[in-house]
Image (cartoon, grey):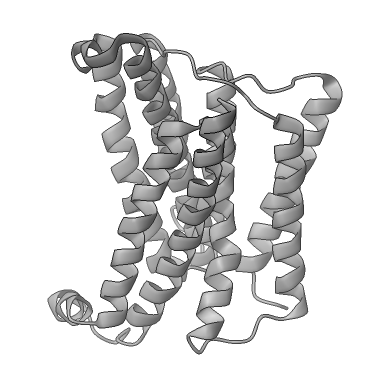
């Protein structure tokens, strides 16, 4: 596994950089025609070189992300994606946005420090176990039920609260999809081509695809309520936390679980989450 981590982790970091740059570029292009609505806005974006460049970066990020998940454990790959937030901040500044202030730079430092502690404690989690169809359905049902309840609770709430909740649910869906992709990879390693017709893998694919689509769709809804200020940090916080919890519980990716290790995990993830949300909160 050590050799594969030399592929997985750089790919995960590069994917985060590409995701962050793509978000900043696409948001810049979309905000230029914010007054437009409907098909006219879609057509304008389809001809905008900046938006197309962002789309190309997104495509590159997906390819790198898939490579990272195919060669490394989900509990290490998904947390790297939080680095997209500092990257998006810096790229947005270079594209003409406001210069990052001290609060934002400190938030970026929190994210990086929290990730460093997390990776130092996790070490090498080893290979993922195969996931049974029953566990896949249970995980999918749990995430769907919790997400539906959270979205229903946003009725009548303000735009920032709504965007945050939609981002959190989007991140949970994306984290679930990443775990299921890892499970499919474990089935392929164990069964080879036979995994293509195995019920466990087929059920994992059947749940993974709608989970991934829901993650993309819900974060776009979050953006409509509050641009990227609340939804994006929420998405990139819930995603790795969901992946780490499900990866450890369902795929049995081996992470230290003594009382002190769990405390360090909780603190590191809390620091990352605090840094992420501070980046999305305008100064008072």
Q: Residue at x 42, y 60 (%)?
A: 222
Compared with residue 252, is residue 119 higher up or lower down, i.e. above or below?
A: below
Q: Residue at x 53, y 84 (%)?
A: 94
Residue 37's image quarter? bottom left
Compared with residue 73, is residue 212 higher up or lower down, i.e. above or below?
A: below
Q: Report the residue that reaches farthest toward the front.
A: 3
Q: Position of residue 24 (x, y in %)?
A: 45, 73
Name the residue nearer the viewer: 248 or 60.
60
Instruction: Specify whether residue 140 is in view.
Output: yes
166 relative to 209 in the view: left or right: right
Quadrant (top left/top right/bottom left/bottom right) for the C terminus: bottom right
Residue 104's image quarter? bottom right
Quadrant (top left/top right/bottom left/bottom right) for the N terminus: top right
Instruction: Specify whether residue 154 is in view.
Output: no
Q: Position of residue 64 (x, y in %)?
A: 40, 49
Name the residue nearer the viewer: 13 or 22.
13
* Count of residue discs: 0
Name the residue nearer the viewer: 204 or 53.
53
Q: Position of residue 283 (x, y in %)?
A: 70, 77
Residue 44's image quarter? bottom left
Q: Residue at x 44, y 36 (%)?
A: 69
Q: Position of residue 241 (x, y in %)?
A: 59, 38
Q: Residue at x 44, y 61 (%)?
A: 18
């Amino acid at each position: 596994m050590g050799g594969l981590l030399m592929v997985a982790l750089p790919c995960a970091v590069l994917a985060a950089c590409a995701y962050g740059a793509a978000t900043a570029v696409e948001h810049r292009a979309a905000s230029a025609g914010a007054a437009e609505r409907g098909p006219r806005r879609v057509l304008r974006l389809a001809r905008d070189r900046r938006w197309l460049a962002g789309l190309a970066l997104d495509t590159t990020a997906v390819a790198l992300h898939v490579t990272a998940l195919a060669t490394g454990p989900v509990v290490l790959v998904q947390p790297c994606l939080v680095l997209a937030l500092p990257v998006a901040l810096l790229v947005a500044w270079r594209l003409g946005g406001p210069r990052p202030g001290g609060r934002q730079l400190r938030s970026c430092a929190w994210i990086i420090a929290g990730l460093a502690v997390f990776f130092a404690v996790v070490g090498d989690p080893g290979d993922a176990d195969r996931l049974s169809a029953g566990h896949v359905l249970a995980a999918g049902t749990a995430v769907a039920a919790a997400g539906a309840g959270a979205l229903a609770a946003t009725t009548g709430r303000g735009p920032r609260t709504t965007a945050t909740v939609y981002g959190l649910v989007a991140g949970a869906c994306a984290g679930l999809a990443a775990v299921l992709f890892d499970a499919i990879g474990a089935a392929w390693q164990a069964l080879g081509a036979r995994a293509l017709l195995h019920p466990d893998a087929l059920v994992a694919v059947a749940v993974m695809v709608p989970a991934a689509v829901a993650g993309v769709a819900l974060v776009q809804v979050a953006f409509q309520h509050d641009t990227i200020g609340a939804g994006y940090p929420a998405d990139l916080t819930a995603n790795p936390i969901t992946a780490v919890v499900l990866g450890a519980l369902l795929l049995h990716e081996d992470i230290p679980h003594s009382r002190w290790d769990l405390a360090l995990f909780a603190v590191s993830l809390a620091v990352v989450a605090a840094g992420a949300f501070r980046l999305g909160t305008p100064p008072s």
